[in-house]
Image (cartoon, grey):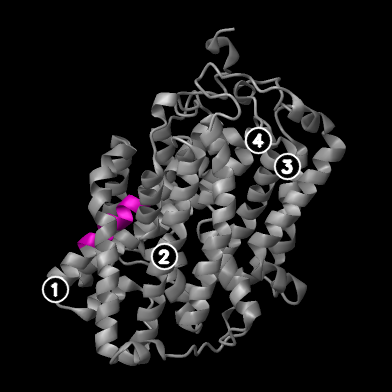
Amino acid sequence: MEAAVMQDPRLYNADLAPTKPEQRTWTTWNFAALWIGMAICIPTYTLASSLVDRGWTWQAAMASVVLGNLVVLLPMVLNAHAGTRYGISFPVLVRSSFGVRGAHVPALLRAGVACGWFGIQTWIGGFAIYALLVAIWPGFGRLPNLLPAWLGIDSAQFLCFLFFWALNLAFVLRGIHSIKVLESWAAPFLLLTGVALFAWAWSEAGGLGAMLASPGSGSGSGSGSAGFGLGSVLGAGLTSAVAFWGTLALNIPDFSRYARSQRDQLIGQAVGLPPTMAFFSFIGAAVTAATVVIFGERIADPITLLARVGGPVVVVISMVGLAAATLTTNIAANVVAPATGFSNVAPAKISFRTGAIITAIIGILIMPWKLYNDAAAYIFTWLIGYGALLGPIAGIMIVDYFLLRRQRLEVDELFRRGGRYEYRNGVNWVALAALGIGVAPNLPGFLGALGVLEAAGIFKALYDWAWFVGVLLAGGIYLLGMAILQPAARAADAAPVLAASAAGAPAAGAD
């Protein structure tokens, strides 16, 4: 049968097609470099620095980040396996568990979170440009504000935000590969900036001991308290650290589909992700702790800190590097997933490029400056909130691929209506029910974080562990539901997998 007959145009286009053997060129170094480039960014710095700003000790903040990244590495390499083995992207992979139409739900949920991150990163880059211009021309910060007060941003800042937004879009429209040269020096520059900040804080604070001696002084309670018992470290802080890259733990197949082997993706990710996150977030936590000694107040935002450290020359060099590094991280981490997810909705009408434009527009509409500038909202509403949403998807994916199907997929069936992954009218209602059940216990805590209602007792405790609750609950419900309601899917495990799809995917076991 010809490929044109086998592939349904409602499920297939060139961007969603499985990668061919000649496209699988990513080595261990490529995956390590990918993670080093994505992890070295301002949100990594502020992941720990925001916890310190909330009153955590630097030790507690670092414990949550290190443990969180070791935890998230597991679903990362597990979900990457199918991408490498079959050459398929995230929206295509979840068709096996959610159905060929039901896959739109997890793909769009992941895309929505990525749009939020795109907006946040764009705001960060735009604010770096704003600080640069103010350093060169102080009057720029005093431009007449023509925007309404409820928007929460003045005209000068919004102009810088729009400029950096347009710069992101320009690179995306030219193709992701156009940022390779920029990526090669931008991330190392940000790393050097972080090391320089650490050295400056060491000198100004009077030594490493004084620098790290600043205790937590939060006055809240629970997740934001300064008590920092084991429950706090392994609760909200750990969940926010896991959720930070819980996004990529879902759509990592978008990258691993280009890997030469499972060994390349596994070792590359293990070498690139946890060490880089630990190192750069330690700089963020330690420098933020030192600002109490140096300035008498905590300064968690590195852009604000750099603006106070040196003169115009230092600010200009730093801000150019920060903006460039933010640009590369934003495109790699926050454009691929939503662009592919939107393309999956209507492959014949939405290309990767069109999906990227949709992502960019949503990135403006969410007003990311309001979200990122509040440490409490950033950690306890944004990070834990979307962790509660995406954790159940990760649990369902892992259970479906490893426990239910035992790593066996029929790739051609993923691009066909009426086949093995059709379920009921293209939707696996067991997966959707498991997703809803996995999210439900965390909903009261999320509404409490938003201030909509008072979440106390068990609901607050569950929300502090939102990602873990979602993974375990949704995964368990999905396994049980499929065993009872979809026994045919389990029987299919023993069936031979097609030798290769006409689109170029390898047979099972071709690692």
User: Would residue 170 be found to the left or right of residue 76 on screen?
Assistant: left
Mark 1 or mark 2: whose residue is earlier in sequence:
2
Q: Earlier in the sequence, mark 1 or mark 3?
A: 1
Disc 3 on helix, strand or loop? helix
Task: Report the quarter where the N terminus lies.
Answer: top right
Give the amino acid type for the residue marked by disc 1 in the picture: Pro
Q: Are marks 3 and 2 in contact (CB under 8 Å)?
A: no
Q: Which residue is mark 3?
A: 403
Q: Is residue 396 above or below residue 473?
A: above
Left or right of 384: which side holds 480?
right
Q: CA distance from mark 4 to mark 1?
A: 56 Å
Q: Specify the label residue 407 is tagged with.
A: 4
Q: Residue at x 48, y 40 (%)?
A: 256
Nearer mark to the viewer, of 4 and 1: 4
User: Splitting the image into 4 quarters, where does residue 339 fall?
Assistant: top left
Residue 304 seen by the camera: yes
Q: Residue 11 appears at what percent x and percent y?
A: 57, 25
Q: Which residue is mark 1?
A: 312
Task: First in sequence, mark 4 or 1: give its number.
Answer: 1
- In which image quadrant can residue 36 be found? bottom left
Q: Is residue 201 left or right of residue 382?
A: left
Mark 2 element type: helix
Percent x, y of residue 405: 71, 35
- Quick one: 78 or 53, which is closer to the camera? 78
Q: Which residues are magenta?
A: 320-330
Asked whether residue 151 is drawn in magenta, I would say: no
At which x and y percent is residue 386?
58, 58
Furthest-top residue in this view:
1
Label 2: which residue?
44
